[in-house]
Amino acid sequence: ETGVTQTPRHLVMGMTNKKSLKCEQHLGHNAMYWYKQSAKKPLELMFVYSLEERVENNSVPSRFSPECPNSSHLFLHLHTLQPEDSALYLCASSHRTGGENGELFFGEGSRLTVL
Amino acid sequence: SQQGEEDPQALSIQEGENATMNCSYKTSINNLQWYRQNSGRGLVHLILIRSNEREKHSGRLRVTLDTSKKSSSLLITASRAADTASYFCATDMEGGSEKLVFGKGTKLTVNP
């Protein structure tokens, strides 16, 4: 139990569906992240929120839309996805101080399959 | 281009042996971190070493950092079958970037 909870753990959706992934952290951290993990590729950073403000958007297609309503919750809204978007989506949180990134605490991930 | 790159990509050893994984990176860093991931699960932080540190220990783990060579190594001593997992290095680049950059990982298999 890392203190970061992701739901759902598994999601199957068609290309025309709209769904959302949810992440919640109970660690009092001030930064939250979405990462994408595909087979045989490095972990890809998608979005970073620091103090609820988006500070990084790594050229992610607009069919992925993040939302951070408060420092404990992070969502990833999905619509009109493609089969190549099938992957493990990992949420993480951390405490950033003085411009340095500390350790990340990851959730267990949401395994997404797009048909 | 990738910041952190682990070597080897895969490693298979017998229980009781030591496992060594290496990570090379390209730019100056604040710190370097090692993570472990069991198949299909989230990553778990193992150890963080700062740029002014050369070696760090945690239980059966030993991490070294050579900033002149821009490389780090993770040694797991007296390995167990439960150590079977993928291991990733992540670099926190100097300059206050908001992100850690991960490598592709080393897949370690420890045979009983």
Image (spheres, coloured by chain):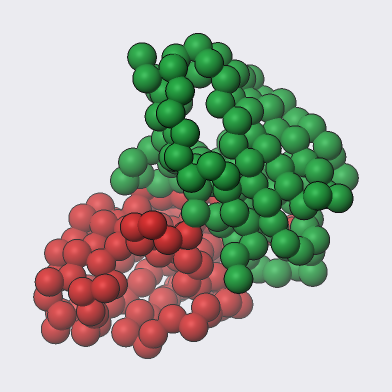
Chain colours: A red, B green
Q: Residue at x 37, y 87 (%)?
A: A62
Question: Which quadrant of the figure has residue B54?
Answer: top right
Q: Nearer the viewer, residue A49 or B20?
A: B20
Of B105 and A22, nearer the camera is: B105
Location of residue A108 in the rendering, given as x and y in whole percent from the top left corner: 36, 47
On screen, residue A84 versus residue B88, left or right, reads left
The residue at the point 80 percent across, 61 percent down is B28
Residue B56 in view here:
yes
Residue A29 visible (yes or no): no
Residue A1 against residue B94 in the figure, above or below: above
How many discs appear? 0
Please identify the quadrant where the N terminus of chain A is shown: top left
Residue A13, position as x, y percentages in the image:
14, 70
Residue at 59% across, 54% down: B5
Q: Where residue B55 appears, x then y in whole percent?
A: 79, 32
Q: Which residue shows up at 71% across the image and 42% down it?
A: B72
Q: Is residue B22 positioned above or below A60 on the image?
A: above
